[in-house]
Image (tube, helix red, strand yellow):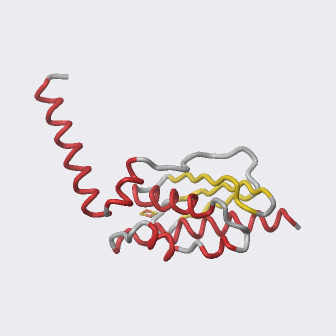
Amino acid sequence: MSDALDNFVQQLQEQIYEETKEAFGETAYQRWRNPLYMGTMESPDGYGRVKGGCGDTIDIFLKFEEDRVKEALFQTDGCGSSMVCGSFAAEMAVGKTSDELVEVTGESILEKLGGLPEENKHCAFLAAASLHEALDDYMVKQK
Ligand code: FES
């Protein structure tokens, strides 16, 4: 690549980063750059997959130990904010008991990541719905 093209691409990338940081805020931006807890799991104790009205899907995988979430992972085919929300849903699930998991809601995810633009808020509710689906799956398997 020529230097001019290199510079152009770099400037464009920096502009995208700046715009994203401005729109989503520092916490969500940092998580977007470094989406922790992303991945899939072989034979999870609880698995949830919910498709939102926007057409995007978030998957949540949970491993429990003595009724407490030992490991949580997420995956999404959706936008950057669904990635951020899936990541926070997984993070907030770790260490919680099955009873406590219901406290992870769309609102609490939004609060944790410092809010999102109006048009992206549904991503947090989708992440919470997937987490609750994974909890349901775990509960059913316990019976
Ligand atoms: Fe639908 Fe992000 S736009 S989950």
Query: Would you say 13 lies left or right of 77 here?
Result: left
Nearer to us in this view, 120 or 33: 33
- Identify the image quadrant of residue 13: top left
The image shows residue 44, relative to residue 6, as above or below, that is below
x and y percent of residue 11 in the render?
A: 16, 41
The residue at 83%/62% (across/down) is 141
**Residue, far top:** 1
The quadrant of the rendered image in which ligand 1 is seen is: bottom left
Horizontal side, residue 139 vs residue 110: left or right: right
Q: What residue appears at the point 20 percent right and 36 percent down from the top-left corner?
A: 9
Residue at 52% over, 53% down:
76
Expressed as whole percent of the image width and height from the top left, the position of residue 28 reads: 38, 60
Quadrant, the N terminus: top left
Nearest the viewer among 57 and 15 is: 15
Residue at 31% x, 63% y: name it: 25
Establish if 53 lies above or below 95.
Answer: below
Q: In the displayed image of the protein, which residue is found farthest to the right?
A: 143
Q: Which percent across, then down, holds residue 130?
A: 61, 65
